[in-house]
Image (tube, rainbow, N blue to C red):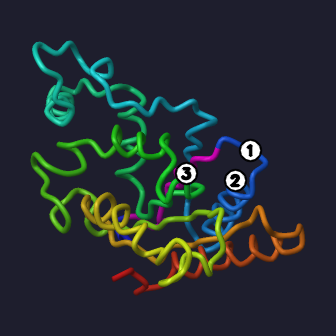
Amino acid sequence: MSTSAAVPTALIVHAHPEPDSFSTAQMAAAAQSLRGVGYQVDVLDLYDDAWAPVLAREGFAPVDGPFKPQAEQMRAVRDGTLDEAVRDHLERLLAADLLVLSFPLWWFSLPAILKGWIDRVFVMGAVFGGDHGIFGDAALAGKRAMLLFTTGGSSEAFRPGGAFGAMDDFLFHIHRGMLEFVGYQVLEPVITYGPAHLTDEERAVALKAAKESVARTATASVSAVG
């Protein structure tokens, strides 16, 4: 956790299309939990904000010749021409001590709208590359990140030898290829398995457990994944 501010800030980036979903309730519980342990919480609800996830030529100043997304990101940072929405989200990302990605696990990965948020907001030249390196030399080094998500399958299905295989195998590309790549210390994920298959009472218990896990993980001095 950064010591540069008296009150640490958490940015929750949420990606579920249904406001009444368990995933959205879990996100709200996490926000409440983080506030309870001293964080100032900023929430980006990508569906509610109608976030445009596609990294495309139209998001940049006129391009002569082939469109090279990362080169255009570098140019936009240099020239101060980043898209207004991207610039706003980037500033909020850079200001946060803790990033929480909240989502349902779809096709063993991030929903497209959240992957598109990373494509557009993890800007080359501002978050990594250019004056920044990668991993420990990237702009977000010293900050922390965690995943908060739900699955359709049971916990047994995501164990080694289970029907789907070990959960860590599915999370590697997110943990290592996205979060650690831009400098984050990655914390243990908070996962609710198969909430659609639970009773109302079981979902209430699961929501309480997730809330407690978020607070415990966010305040632990050493809880990074290996």
Tell me which label, 1 or 2, sits earlier in the chain: 1
Image-based side of 112 in relation to 174, left or right: right
Image-based side of 200 in relation to 108, left or right: right
In which quadrant of the rendered view does residue 68 lie?
A: top left
Label 1 – label 2 distance at C-alpha: 6 Å
- Indicate whether residue 178 is drawn in magenta: no
Image-based side of 226 in relation to 198, left or right: left
Q: Which residues are magenta?
A: 5-16
Where does residue 128 sit, x and y in percent of width and height?
19, 51
* Residue closest to the eye, 148 or 125: 148
Label 1 – label 3 distance at C-alpha: 17 Å
Label 2 – label 3 distance at C-alpha: 15 Å
Instruction: Identify which amino acid the numbered label 3 is placed on.
Output: Asp
Where does residue 107 sit, x and y in percent of width and height?
51, 54
Q: Residue at x 51, y 32 (%)?
A: 51
Say few, some or many: other residues with alpha carbon within 10 Å of mark 3 (under 14 / 14 to 19 / 20 or more).
some
Say few, some or many: other residues with alpha carbon within 10 Å of mark 2 (under 14 / 14 to 19 / 20 or more).
many
In which quadrant of the rendered view does residue 150 lie?
A: bottom right
Quickly name the residue at label 3: 42
Q: Residue at x 52, y 50 (%)?
A: 13
Quickly name the residue at label 2: 24
